[in-house]
Image: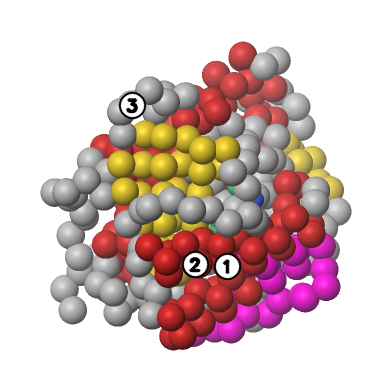
Amino acid sequence: MSPPKPRRYSVRSRVLVTGGAGFIGSHLCERLLQAGCDVLCVDNFFTGTKDNIAHLVGQPHFEVLRHDVTFPLYVEVDEIYNLACPAAPVHYQFDPVQTTKTSVHGAINMLGLAKRVKAKILQASTSEVYGDPQVHPQVESYWGHVNPIGLRSCYDEGKRCAETLFFDYHRQHKVRVKVARIFNTYGPRMHPNDGRVVSNFIVQALKGEPITIYGDGSQTRSFCYVDDMVDALVRLMGAPDDFTGPVNLGNPAECTIRALAEEVLRLTRSRSKIVRRKLPGDDPRQRQPDIALARKSLGWTPSTRLEAGLKKAIAYFRTQVESRP
Ligand SMILES: NC(=O)c1ccc[n+]([C@@H]2O[C@H](COP(=O)([O-])OP(=O)(O)OC[C@H]3O[C@@H](n4cnc5c(N)ncnc54)[C@H](O)[C@@H]3O)[C@@H](O)[C@H]2O)c1
């Protein structure tokens, strides 16, 4: 099977993006508008902001609807990107019951909509479905090692159940589904106070505050720049119907948390000190995607190097820190 080319829309597709005012969602809306789609952004603004989409509001083919995906939605669309869900632990643990509802009820509502209007639907799943993995790097066939009753479970198990629903709607109702397992993604418009490692380090460095590392900093993560991730999501949606995923999307270049902290200090020219804190429960030791399937089936490979991506993220956070001291 030859990999699909990036999409060009000849007839204006009507595309729904849930969580469209969030970090990844706002970049996706932007990309879809550039590709000539009619974009409906649905968000309850729990973690997303109007600022993230302010530059899109007023464009004739962009529409925003305040709506919570745990309630049914009746609109006519051709494609649905289901991104609605808080992604950072500090946000998804704030109201864990609502987090599970967002993943599970949200999936049921969006799949029901896809079934009714015969839309194609893509789920933003997560590497967290692998839990604290015993297999490195993680391949899609690995079923994971997840704690069902821990503090992260509302997110991990919610996303796992959403995947189950996607494949059951596919088998039972012939809904055309795509499941993307997204690994750590970073870039402009990440929430500055969400406690995620990239935003945390950059904001701390820009404010001259100590950079906090949990544990000894030898745990690894791999970071994908948001433009690369959006490119992958659009390619996945455009892939043939028999390609459902799940497919890992992320940047396989691994980096220790300590090395990331040092790179942020170098690029921000900050004099912040690195300090260590106790490792929280259920924190994975290593996180690295195996993206062989995405490379082969989507013809996709991330192209933004960490230094280049960090520079763009730092420029964004500088404006945030300066406007909200
Ligand atoms: N950013 C990452 O590194 C990453 C990694 C893995 C998976 N993901 C997934 O990608 C998606 C987007 O993540 P993000 O980083 O942009 O997070 P984000 O928090 O910036 O975006 C999520 C958006 O969903 C909205 N939302 C939350 N609950 C909702 C509800 N019940 N109804 C309607 N809208 C709701 C929020 O207001 C926000 O705009 C999420 O589903 C997340 O689980 C992200």
**For residue 150: magenta?**
yes
Relative to 108, say whether 305 is above or below. Answer: above
Residue 133 vertical placement versus 64 (above, below): below
Give the percent coordinates (x, y) of residue 5: 18, 60
Q: Quickly name the residue at label 1.
A: 108
CB of mark 3 within 8 Å of CB of mark 2? no
Mark pair 3, 1: CA separation: 30 Å
The amino acid type, in three-letter code, at marker 2 is: Leu
Q: With 155 as the anchor, is 118 left or right in this view?
A: left
Q: Residues within 10 Å of mark 2 (few under 14, many from 20)?
A: many
**Disc 3 and disc 1 in contact, CB within 8 angstroms:** no
Q: How far apart are marks 3 and 2 (CA)?
A: 28 Å
Report if residue 291 is visible in the image.
no
Amino acid type indicated by mark 1: Ile
Residue farthest right in this picture: 278
Please name whichever residue, 144 or 60, is drawn nearer the observer in this view of the structure: 60
What quarter of the picture does the C terminus occupy?
top right
Magenta residues span 139-160
**Of the pair 258 and 38, the residue shown nearer to us:** 38
At 50% from the left edge and 49% from the top edge, which residue is drawn? Answer: 18
Q: Mark 2 points at which residue?
A: 111
Q: What residue type is labelled 3?
A: Gln
Of mark 3 and mark 2, the one earlier in the sequence is 3
Is there a contact, CB below 8 Å, between mark 2 and mark 1? yes
From the image, tell me which residue sits under label 3: 59
Magenta-drawn stretch, dominant element (helix, strand or loop) = loop
